[in-house]
Image (cartoon, helix red, strand yellow):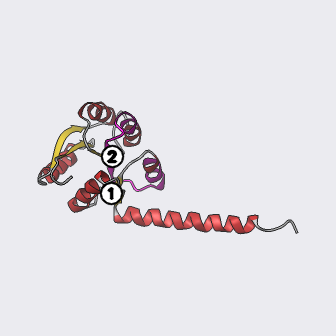
Amino acid sequence: MLDKTITLFLADDHTIVRQGLAKLLEGEANLRVVGEAENGREAVEKVERLKPNIVLMDIAMPLLNGIEATRQIRKVCPQTKVIILSMHSHDRYISELFSLGASGYLLKNSTGIDIIKAIHAALKGETYLSPSISQKVIEDYISLKRKSHQEDLYNSLSNR
């Protein structure tokens, strides 16, 4: 995959963010930004037409949020990987986006190296998370396991 050009699409309602990402990504030899959108509806329409390898998607966008845009993109272009790049780290967003098939979740305080790693991981069918998101997912998993174990113990009690 290193020899092949990886096509990218940027979906964020802030122009400066899209321009900064484009500049960062175009600096990599095998990456090429093929399109941009400032709202979710525009992102879905353009991604369906352009069929990029990867979409970098913000969550909070006008007309159609990034969650619904991800749902629609994964439906019309299942081969296109979606990586979330957001300032939101709410558990609800994380779990919903992964259930929709997102390939990564990065916070906007991530480094350019993290974004590049997430792109390459997505292309290999792997999942990439920001370190703080990884920690949150692990804590939620441990909490769920602990709760499940307590329920199992309770259910094993006899009526007596």
User: Could you classify mark 1 by the number of other residues whose Cα lies within 10 Å: few (under 14), some (14-19), or many (20 or more)?
Assistant: many
Residue at (32, 46) in percent of width and height = 81
Answer with left or right where residue 97 lies relative to residue 118.
right
SS at mark 1 in the image? strand
- Badge 2 marks a residue whose secondary structure is strand
Region of the chain picked out in magenta, as a range: 72-97
Residue 104 percent coordinates (x, y): 35, 54
Q: Residues within 10 Å of mark 2 (few under 14, many from 20)?
A: many
Amino acid marked by disc 1: Leu
Labels 1, 2: front one: 2
As drawn, the label of residue 6 is none
Disc 2 designates what residue? 82
State yes or no: residue 150 in magenta: no
Residue 128: x and y, percent? 34, 58
Determine whether 155 is above or below 76 in the image: below
Tell me the residue that label 1 is attached to. Answer: 107
Q: Amino acid at mark 2?
A: Val
* Mark 1 touches mark 2? (CB < 8 Å): no
In terms of sequence position, does the residue under pointer 1 or pointer 2 come before the other?
Answer: 2
- Quadrant of image for the C terminus: bottom right
Q: Position of residue 155 (x, y in %)?
A: 75, 64
In terms of depth relative to the viewer, which is nearer, 96 or 29? 29
Side of 80 relative to 148 (left or right): left
Question: Image quarter for residue 40?
Answer: top left
The span from disc 1 to disc 2 (Cα, nearest Å) is: 14 Å
